[in-house]
Amino acid sequence: MKWIGMVLCFTLVSCAMVNVYITFPEEQIREAAEEIEGEIEGEPSGDTSYLQFIYGKVLYAEEITPQIKTDSPVIRQAKEKRKSWRKKIDEFKRKGYIGESNRYSVEILRLPEDSELAREVKEIVRKENRERDVIIKELVRINNARLQEEKFREIFAEVKRKYAKKGEWIQLPSGKWVQKE
């Protein structure tokens, strides 16, 4: 009888199910992008909703979400470099020479006729894209999220579209280029 009771007890205990998820949800990646890009860009362009301040987030007890690390010497250095040429990037965007792609990079849309200025546009775009790659690769490395690099790029590109100013060229997720309204 004890034997049957132990087997029955073991069977019931082994049927218990515990779900634990360790992931980097889009919202956390978006917050990391906002933190990094917000420091470089300042305030986002366009209207923001006050609902985000009224309603809190839904948290589920069965989900464990590690905090995304957004700080390292490599990321700090890349942000400082990007800040140093930000005015040029803004100027080139205003003039329609460059735009924000849907892959978290800056793309040349047209070059100025002046060859010296065209060379400067190419150089700034090359440096900006190199530092953006450094940021993404470092985020992936310090968070051990190698399989989520594309998701990081996608969400960072979304945040860059949000920060784009009216009239600047942005590439939608579909690949279509439009001027931000």
Image: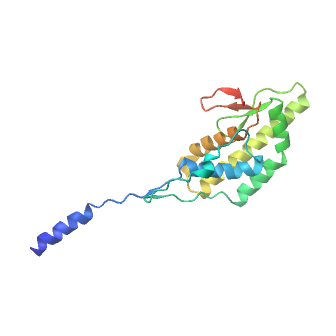
Residue occupying the far top of the picture: 113
Up/down of 50 relative to 179, above or below = below
Which residue occupies the foreground of this view, 91 or 45?
A: 45
Percent across and percent down for residue 78 are 75, 52
Percent across and percent down for residue 120 are 86, 36
Q: Residue at x 89, y 28 (%)?
A: 115
Q: Is residue 25 left or right of residue 97?
A: left
Q: Residue at x 84, y 30 (%)?
A: 95
Residue occupying the far left of the picture: 1
Location of the N terminus by quadrant is bottom left
Q: Is residue 59 left or right of residue 142?
A: left
In the rendered image, which quarter is residue 109 located in? top right
Percent across and percent down for residue 26 are 55, 47
Which residue occupies the foreground of this view, 4 or 127?
A: 4
In the rendered image, which quarter is residue 70 located in? bottom right
Please give the count of numbered marks on the rendered protein: 0
Percent across and percent down for residue 141 are 61, 55
Up/down of 98 relative to 25, above or below = above
Location of the C terminus by quadrant is top right
Q: How is the image coloured?
A: rainbow
